[in-house]
Amino acid sequence: MKIVNILLVIFIVFLLVSNTSACRCYRGKGYGYYCGYELGCGVDSIWWCPGYGAAARYVGLCYNCCAPPGKDSYCC
């Protein structure tokens, strides 16, 4: 049982760290990382979040990192 608890903690920490490292957005710059639908937002954009899908827009730490509260981020 103790092993299960340890694995659960490691899994949660991994989720938090991986989500945070994937979210590097710069408002108004037109580039960054965002966990969502968009794969491209102009020539200079790097909107790609490997391993994440549409659900990450709602549950991930990256949600709204380049948009006003309650809005999806399409381009900074």
Image (cartoon, helix red, strand yellow):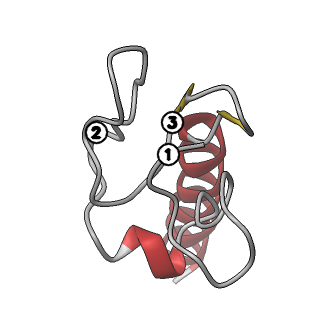
Compare residues 74 and 50 and report the one nearer the observer: 74
Q: How far apart are marks 1 and 2 (CA)?
A: 18 Å
Give the label, 1 or 2, closer to the camera: 1
In the rendered structure, which amino acid carries the disc numbered 1? Cys
- Residue at screen point 65% across, 34% down: 24
Q: Do the residues labelled 1 and 2 touch (CB within 8 Å)?
A: no
In the rendered structure, which amino acid carries the disc numbered 3? Tyr
In the rendered structure, which amino acid carries the disc numbered 2? Pro
| Quadrant assignment, res 47 | top left
Task: Please tell me whether mark 1 sits on a helix, a strand or a loop.
Answer: loop
**Residue 75 shows which numbered tag?**
1
Question: Disc 2 marks which residue?
Answer: 50
| Quadrant assignment, res 43 | top left
Return the disc, 1 or 2, that comes first in the chain's sequence: 2
**Residue 33 shows which numbered tag?**
3
Figure check: 30 above or below 57: above
Give the label, 3 or 2, closer to the camera: 3
Residue 67 percent across, percent down from the top left: 66, 61
Q: Distance between the residues labelled 1 and 3?
A: 11 Å
- Residue at screen point 60% across, 57% down: 62
Q: Is residue 73 left or right of residue 40?
A: right
Give the label, 1 or 3, closer to the camera: 1
Task: Please tell me whether mark 3 sits on a helix, a strand or a loop.
Answer: loop
Tell me if mark 1 has few (under 14), some (14-19) or many (20+) residues whose alpha carbon lies within 10 angstroms of its own. some
Return the disc, 1 or 3, that comes first in the chain's sequence: 3
